[in-house]
Amino acid sequence: MSVLKEIYNFRVVSGRLATAGQPTASELAEVAAAGFEVVVNLGLANAPYALPDEAATVAALGLDYAHVPVSFEAPAPEDLERFCGLMDSLDGRRLFVHCAANKRVSVLVALWQLRAGRWDSRETEDFIASVWLPTPPWQQLINETVESSAARRPSGA
């Protein structure tokens, strides 16, 4: 995975999951060569940083592709719900999840991990902080999700 570390803000979450900022077409080829099966893009398709046809590029590499565009300026709880549903449906597959700079992704992946009970609030915060300091709209989504996840846990857990 040493070549993958060259992708902007690349992070390994687990043996089946890695995140990053926008890869180039050649970096996507490295993602495929590393054995990932699915590319999930949370960036906006018409943004200046986006590849012209990422879906076709990924398909040509033999990978599956999912696009869940999330507004950077206005993330919504519905975005998290769509993302978690997608990630749950891909359980067991090797996933490479990206956006422009791994900011959207770091938050949504961390919250997905938290909601699934794989991470606690400290691990969630640490992963996000390894990428960026969230802006107020993102911090609100984080706070609401952490609070609701804590409320769902039995006391003493």
Image (tube, rainbow, N blue to C red):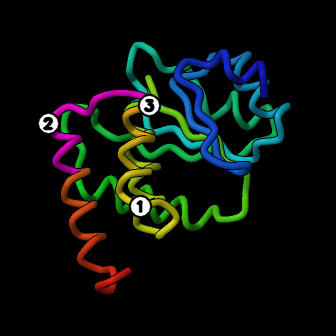
| Snapshot quadrant of residue 31 | top right
Describe the element under mark 2 as helix, strand or loop.
helix
140 and 91: which one is in front? 140
Q: Residue at x 71, y 24 (%)?
A: 4
- Disc 3: which residue: 130
Viewed as shown, does residue 30 lie left or right of 141? right
Describe the element under mark 3 as helix, strand or loop.
loop
**Residue 116 is inside the magenta segment:** no
| Snapshot quadrant of residue 12 | top right
70 and 155: which one is in front? 155
Q: Residue at x 51, y 38 (%)?
A: 41
- Residue 145 x, y percent position in the rendering: 26, 61
Residue count near mark 2 (Cα–Cα under 10 Å), binned few <14, some 14–19, many ≥20: few
Nearer the observer: mark 2 or 1; the answer is 1
- Disc 1: which residue: 120
Amino acid tagged 3: Ser
- For this orientation, the residue located farthest to the front is 156
On residue 157, which mark appears?
none
Residue count near mark 1 (Cα–Cα under 10 Å), binned few <14, some 14–19, many ≥20: some
- Residue 91 x, y percent position in the rendering: 65, 65
Name the quadrant of the C terminus.
bottom left
Mark 2 or mark 1: whose residue is earlier in sequence: 1
Name the quadrant of the N terminus.
top right
- Disc 2: which residue: 136
Which span of residues is magenta-colored? 130-141
Q: Residue at x 35, y 62 (%)?
A: 81
Q: Residue at x 56, y 40 (%)?
A: 97
Distance from the alpha carbon under mark 2 to that under mark 1: 21 Å
